[in-house]
Amino acid sequence: VEVKTPALVDYLKGALALDAKDRSAALLYFFRYLDHADETVANDAFLEFAKANDAEVGQVAKKLSPDRLKKLMADPKTPAGRIGLFAFLLGACGTTDDADVLRRMLDKPDERTAGALDGALAGYIQLRSKEGWQLAHSILQDEKRPFADRCAVLNMLRFTHGWKGKEAEAEILKGVGTLLQQGDIADMAIEDLRKWKQYELTASVLALYGKKSHDAPLMRRAIVRYALCCPRDEAKRFVDERRKQDGELVKDVEESLSFEKAK
């Protein structure tokens, strides 16, 4: 990396002095540099947020400055790909007035904010939980909405699961349950349930197998993979039946799972 200004050296010295175990303090440090005049410094500071896990980002969000976040979001120099993160952070530390800012982003997105649906919705839910979840579910239930919109809400559910966990479980499962009925995205929802080890919707997942709208090879593999990992009796019976009907498919999925476990 080319050093263009002394600021980069000072920034790196400060970063090296951070306690690696105190992620909140580290992210607070990097937050100070998100709008730095040295592009290299600003980019590196953002990457520290990007590589942090969901819980780390959620924990530090409430400690940030809403005014600074709004400035970053309004700055035309801010890359569009960063607005989603800033919108979520604003929701976590902002006020009811900031909820109006996020709602406008959701209702009337422009070229720069169109790709920030997941972050804006996650932020809005923090400030207006009931309204935010209602909006999220209405988007998921509308199969005429573009795939990208429904996928963005699924991304929001993933983030919320990684951050809030049990606290938001009912709303998350409600959203995922809606997506299970949509053949163009159900495989992604099933895979998330498997990774989360959430088996409350097992009957709904297994019932999709062979359904005309869900009969793509990728979908069948997702359902079998979920069933192989599920500890419930109905899943074990389902796998036994699949072995009789399509043993090669089950064998292939088992092999892919063995590679996953080996990593």
Image (tube, rainbow, N blue to C red):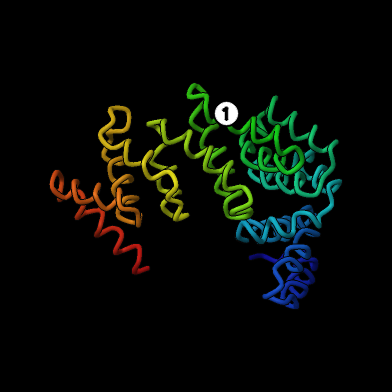
Front in this rendered view, residue 146 or 203: 203
Instruction: Give the residue displayed 38% in from the left and 45% down from the top.
Output: 202
Residue appearing at x 73%, y 56% in the figure: 42
Between 99 and 174, the residue placed more toward the observer is 174
- Most distant residue in the top direction: 144
Residue 45: x %, y % from top left: 71, 60
Q: Can residue 43 be seen in this view?
A: no
Q: Is mark 1 on a helix, strand or loop?
A: helix
In the figure, 257 relative to 119: above or below?
below
Residue 103 higher or lower than 57, as above or below: above
Horizontal side, residue 170 vs residue 91: left or right: left
> Where is residue 67 shown, x and y percent of the image?
86, 46
The reply, left or right, for residue 220 in relation to residue 243 is right
Tell me, yes or no, if residue 225 can be seen here: yes
Local packing at callout 1 (Cα closer than 10 Å; few below 14, some 14-19, many 20+) is: some
What is the total number of numbered labels drawn onto the structure image?
1
Residue beneath disc 1: 139
| Residue displayed at 47% across by 54% down | 196
Q: Which of 27 and 212 is in front in this view?
A: 212
Which residue shows up at 64% across the image and 38% down it? 116
Residue 204 located left or right of residue 95 = left
**Residue 158 image point, x, y percent:** 55, 48
Task: Answer above or below: position of 92 versus 175.
Answer: below
Residue 243, horizontal then vertical, whole percent: 16, 50
Q: Quadrant of the C terminus?
A: bottom left
Residue 104 position by quadrant? top right
Quadrant where the image shows the N terminus? bottom right
Pick the front one: 108 or 167 = 167
The kind of residue on which mark 1 rests is Ile
